[in-house]
Amino acid sequence: MISINDFAVIDMFCGVGGLTHGFVKAGFNVVAGYDIDKSCKYAFEENNKGAKYITKNIKEVTGEELNSFFASKKKILVGCAPCQPFSLYSNKNKISKKIDDENTEGKWALLYSFARLIQETDAQIVSMENVPQLAKFNEGKILSDFISVLESMDYSVDWSVVNAQDYGVPQRRKRLILLASKLGEISLLPPTHNITNYITVRQAIGNLPKIEDGVPDKNDSLHFARKLGDLNKRRIQATREGGFWREWPEELKLACHKKEGGASFRSVYGRMSWDDVAPTMTTYCIGLGNGRFGHPEQDRAISMREAALFQSFPINYNFQNPEKPLSTATVARHIGNAVPVKLGEIIAESIKKHLEEYGSK
C-alpha cells in the first residue's frame, strides 16, 4: 500500500513558500526548497518548519544533491520556473521572441535545468507551474521540449491552463499547471468554485482593520499601505468602487491617458470591487498606479497583508524577520511572485488523490 508518508517533496524556485505551504497543508513532507534569492529564506523556513531553504542557482544543483534530501523516500519534485521570458510584458517589449542556443544560457535555461534535475533524480512525480504564455511561446517549443523529456522517461503527462479563482483563490490568475507521474495517469482536480461561490475581495480582506496610507496597523506591520502623494490622494478619492482613471475630471488625468492611445491603457489607478475577485497580484501590487490595486473604499492602495491574503496565504504567514526587516518593495515582490497557497494545495491534493488511486490497485 502506498501513501503520502512514503514520499518527500522538494520545491525548486520556492520563493517564500507559496507552493510548499500548499503541500504542507495537504499533509506532505517538504524537505527542502531551492531559490537563488536569499531574502526569501526567513519566510520560507519560518512558515514551513522542517523544510530547509537552500540559496543556490538551479544550474549549479545536481540530482545527487537532491537525492541526499530525498534519502530513502520516494520523490516528488515540484517547481515554478521564473516566468519573465514568457510574460506578456516580455512579449510586448520584444525581450525574446524566440528560443535559440544563445538564449538557453539565460533565463530560458531554467526550465531546461529543471528537466535535467528530473532526469537525474528520476522522481516518481513531478509538477510544474508557469504562465499560460509558455504553451504558445515560440510555437510551444519550450513546453514541448519539457514534455518530451518527461515522456522519454515514461511519465504520464497532463497539463492545462486554469484560473486560480476556480479553485478558491480570491484573485483572477491564469496559470499553466503540469503534472507527471511514473505510476500512471494523473490529472488536476476539477474546479471547486464558480461564479456562484468565488471568494470575493470582501470575504478575503473585509474584516481587516481600517488603516491610513503610510500608517501600519499597530498589531500587524504587514498591514501597511504606501503613503500617497497629494495628487494620487485626490485621484483615489475621485475613484468609485470598481472604477478607474477614465472617470476622473481632466485635471487629474495623466498626460499619457489624454493622448490618442491612452484609452487602451489597462485599468490602472483603479479600485477593486467588494463583491468581485481581485485582479492578478503582481510584484507591483501595492502600487496604486500599477493596476486596479486601490482598496474598494479606503483612500489607499492595498496593503502587503491584503496582497498576501489575495494570494491565499494564511493571515499569520510571517514574511518579515524582525531582526532584519525587508523593504516594502521586496516583500511585495515576494508576495506577487508566489504560487497562491490554495493553488499549491490543489496541486498537492491532486497528487494525493493520484497516490490513493494507485495504492488501491
Image (cartoon, rainbow, N blue to C red):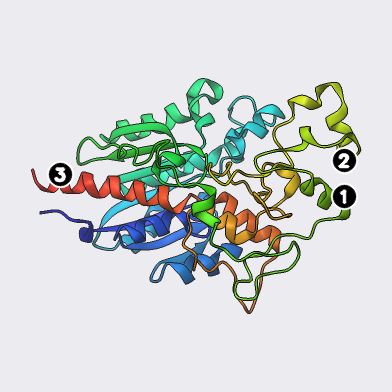
Q: Mark 3 points at which residue?
A: 358
- Measured as percent of width and height from the top left, residue 215 is found at 73, 68
Q: Is residue 259 visible?
A: yes
Q: Residue at x 51, y 24 (%)?
A: 136
Q: Quick check: 225 left or right of 11?
A: right
Query: Can you tell which of label 3 and label 1 is closer to the viewer?
Result: 1
Q: Distance between the residues labelled 2 and 1?
A: 7 Å
Q: In the rendered structure, which amino acid carries the disc numbered 1?
A: Leu
Q: How far apart are marks 3 and 1 (CA)?
A: 60 Å
Q: In the rendered structure, which amino acid carries the disc numbered 3?
A: Tyr
Q: Residues within 10 Å of mark 2 (few under 14, many from 20)?
A: some
Residue contact between numbered discs 2 and 1, judged by CB atoms under 8 Å: yes
> Which numbered disc, 3 or 2, marks the residue that appears first in the sequence?
2
Residue contact between numbered discs 3 and 2, judged by CB atoms under 8 Å: no
- Measured as percent of width and height from the top left, residue 138 is found at 55, 23
Q: Can residue 13 be seen in this view?
A: no
164 vs 314: above or below? above
Q: Quick check: 56 left or right of 88?
A: left
Q: Name the residue under label 1.
A: 231
74 vs 354: above or below? below
Q: Which residue is drawn at 55% across and 54% down?
A: 57
Question: Circle 2 — which element?
Answer: helix
Question: Circle 1 — which element?
Answer: helix
18 or 232: which is nearer to us? Answer: 232
Q: Residue at x 74, y 59 (%)?
A: 226
Q: Name the residue under label 2.
A: 252
Q: Residue at x 48, y 43 (%)?
A: 113
Quarter occupied by the C terminus: top left
